Image (cartoon, rainbow, N blue to C red):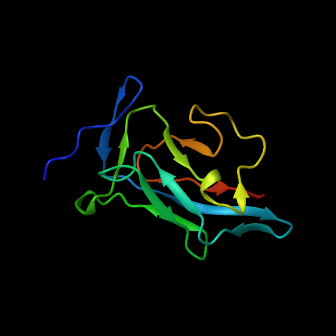
């Protein structure tokens, strides 16, 4: 089955790699990290067809598969961060203050993917 055309970010041409992106969505409470079950994470270049969503399980764990045979993987280019959105997809939570600015704006994060990547995401209650 032929792959769709490679998406691009600016001048970078991305290549679909059999790598995964996963982590835990959580909030900090007086007792430490508390998982946010049902949190929605959007990954722009994840999956063969891109524009993929993952829902965190009861432990706050989300996962974008790297299994290319099943339509997974992440479109990457060396040194180019992968945009993911989480802040505005979760009505009771938002980004914590002090995050670095990213070109996509509030609600977005960027993660550099070089192989299977774990990226934990902190949110705060609205």
Q: Number of numbered discs present? A: 0
Percent across and percent down for residue 103 are 58, 31
Q: Judge left or right: residue 47 versus residue 102.
A: left
Residue lying at 20% horizontally and 46% vertically, measured from the top left: 3
Q: Is residue 96 above or below residue 10?
A: below
Residue occupying image coordinates x 60% and y 77% = 58
Outermost residue, bottom side: 58
Q: Residue at coordinates 30% horizontally, 44% vertically from top-left?
A: 16
Look at the picture and state if 84 lies above or below 105.
below
Q: Position of residue 35 (x, y in %)?
A: 67, 69
Q: Nearer the viewer, residue 37 or 88?
A: 88
Farthest left residue? 1
Q: Which percent across, then down, holds residue 121?
A: 63, 55
For the residue pair 42 and 112, the one nearer the viewer reads as: 42
Residue 79 x %, y %? 45, 31
Q: Identify the image quadrant of the C terminus.
A: bottom right
State the residue in front, 20 or 106: 106
The picture quadrant where one finds residue 36 is bottom right
Q: Residue furthest top?
A: 11
Left or right for 72, reference 103? left
């Amino acid at each position: 089955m032929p792959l769709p055309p490679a998406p691009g970010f600016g001048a970078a041409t991305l290549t679909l790699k059999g790598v995964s992106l996963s982590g835990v969505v959580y909030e900090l409470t007086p007792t430490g990290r508390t998982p946010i079950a049902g949190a929605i994470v959007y990954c722009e270049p994840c999956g063969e067809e891109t524009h993929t969503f993952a829902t965190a399980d009861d432990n706050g764990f989300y996962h974008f598969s790297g299994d290319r045979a099943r339509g997974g993987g992440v479109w990457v280019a060396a040194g180019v961060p992968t945009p993911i959105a989480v802040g505005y997809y979760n009505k009771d939570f938002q980004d914590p203050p002090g995050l670095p600015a990213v070109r996509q704006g509030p609600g977005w994060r960027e993660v550099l993917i070089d192989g299977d990547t774990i990226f934990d995401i902190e949110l705060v209650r609205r």
